[in-house]
Image (tube, helix red, strand yellow):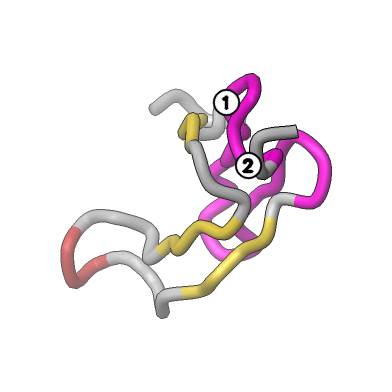
C-alpha cells in the first residue's frame, strides 16, 4: 500500500477485532467499537467502515 494510504475494511458489526494482519507480523489483537460510521485501529491505522444499514439493530 502506498505511504499515506490506509487499508479500508467494510464491516457489518459495530464491534471488530484487528491484529494488523500479516499473520504473526501484525500487532496485539485489539477490539474496536464503531460508534458512528467508522473507526480506525490505533496500531496499524486500518479504517473500519460500517456498511449501510448494518449494526443498527434493525432500526
Q: Nearer the viewer, residue 35 or 5?
A: 35
Please tell me whether mark 1 or mark 2 is closer to you in this view: 2
Q: Is residue 43 above or below residue 46?
A: below
The number of discs equals 2
Q: Which residue is mark 2?
A: 55
The residues bearing labels 1 and 2 have C-alpha atoms spaced at a distance of 8 Å
| Magenta-highlighted residues | 35-56
Residue at horizontal 80%, vertical 51%? 35
Q: Nearer the viewer, residue 43 or 39?
A: 39
Residue 49 on the magenta segment: yes
Residue at horizontal 32%, vertical 65%? 26
Q: Residue pushed farthest front? A: 58
Where is the C terminus found, in terms of image quarters? top right
The x, y position of residue 20, in whole percent, is 38, 59
Q: Tell me the crowding category of disc 1: few under 14, some 14 to 19, or many 20 or more residues within 10 angstroms, Cα based.
A: some
Q: Is residue 3 above or below residue 42?
A: above
Q: Which residue is mark 1?
A: 51
Q: Nearer the viewer, residue 27 or 11?
A: 11
Give SS at disc 2.
loop
Residue 44 on the magenta segment: yes
Disc 1 to disc 2: CB gap under 8 Å: yes
Quarter-wise, where is residue 18 in the image? bottom left
Amino acid at each position: 500500500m502506498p505511504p499515506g494510504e490506509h487499508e479500508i475494511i467494510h464491516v457489518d458489526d459495530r464491534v471488530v477485532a484487528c491484529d494488523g494482519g500479516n499473520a504473526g507480523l501484525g500487532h496485539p489483537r485489539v477490539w474496536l467499537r464503531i460508534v458512528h460510521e467508522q473507526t480506525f485501529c490505533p496500531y496499524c491505522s486500518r479504517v473500519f467502515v460500517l456498511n449501510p444499514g448494518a449494526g443498527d439493530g434493525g432500526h
